[in-house]
Structures are given as structure tokens and as C-alpha cells.
């Protein structure tokens, strides 16, 4: 059986925020994923919304700045 349960790490121990459906002494396998990390589908959704509501000119200006490596890293353009 698989359960998804939120927990808090305190004083070296994971404390579940909800009651677990486990038998006493039952062994389990934990997969830890921080809540502040985005799932791949959440990242794609955010990426799709980056230019939402901007004009073509604004998008072009942003991309020009983003791709201008000299602006960010002080590199010579070749």
C-alpha cells in the first residue's frame, strides 16, 4: 500500500502531520521530497506562463537580455 503523508523534520526525527495507516513494527520505505521543490509538470506549467500577457516586443527584449552572455558574465561576444 502506498501513502503520501506530509511530515516535519524536528530534532533528527520525521514527525508525520497526519495519522499513518501502519501496523506497529511495520517496515516502510521513505522517499523524501521537499515541499518547496517543484515536480517536473509544475516546472513545465510555470515555464509555459513566463511570457503570458507580454507583447512580442517585450518578449524580444527579455530574450535579447537573457541571451546576451556578455551582459551577465562579462564575456567578449564573438
Image (cartoon, grey):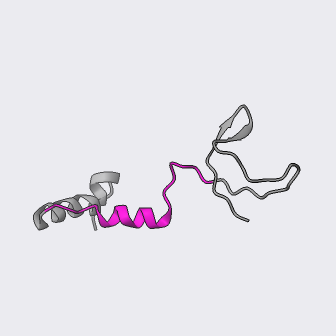
Q: Residue at x 61, y 54 (%)?
A: 33
Residue 55, x across and y down, in percent: 12, 64
Looking at the picture, tell me which residue is in the foreground, 20 or 43.
Answer: 20
Q: Residue at x 15, y 61 (%)?
A: 54
- 52 left or right of 56 in image: right
Picture layout, residue 64 above or below residue 74 = below
Regarding residue 76, the answer to whether it shows in the image is no
Picture layout, residue 10 above or below residue 63 = above
- 48 left or right of 36 in image: left
Looking at the picture, tell me which residue is in the foreground, 12 or 25.
Answer: 25
Residue 70, x across and y down, in percent: 29, 56
The boundaries of the magenta stretch are 33-54
Residue 21, x across and y down, in percent: 74, 53
- 52 left or right of 43 in image: left
| Quadrant location, the N terminus | bottom right
41 in the magenta segment: yes
| Quadrant location, the C terminus | bottom left
Regarding residue 38, the answer to whether it shows in the image is yes
Amino acid at each position: 500500500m502506498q501513502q503520501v503523508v506530509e511530515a516535519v523534520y524536528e530534532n533528527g526525527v520525521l514527525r508525520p502531520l497526519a495519522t499513518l495507516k501502519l501496523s506497529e513494527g511495520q517496515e516502510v520505505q521513505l522517499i523524501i521530497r521537499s515541499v518547496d521543490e517543484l515536480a517536473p509538470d509544475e516546472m513545465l506549467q510555470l515555464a509555459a506562463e513566463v511570457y503570458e500577457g507580454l507583447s512580442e516586443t517585450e518578449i524580444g527584449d527579455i530574450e535579447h537580455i537573457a541571451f546576451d552572455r556578455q551582459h551577465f558574465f562579462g564575456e567578449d561576444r564573438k
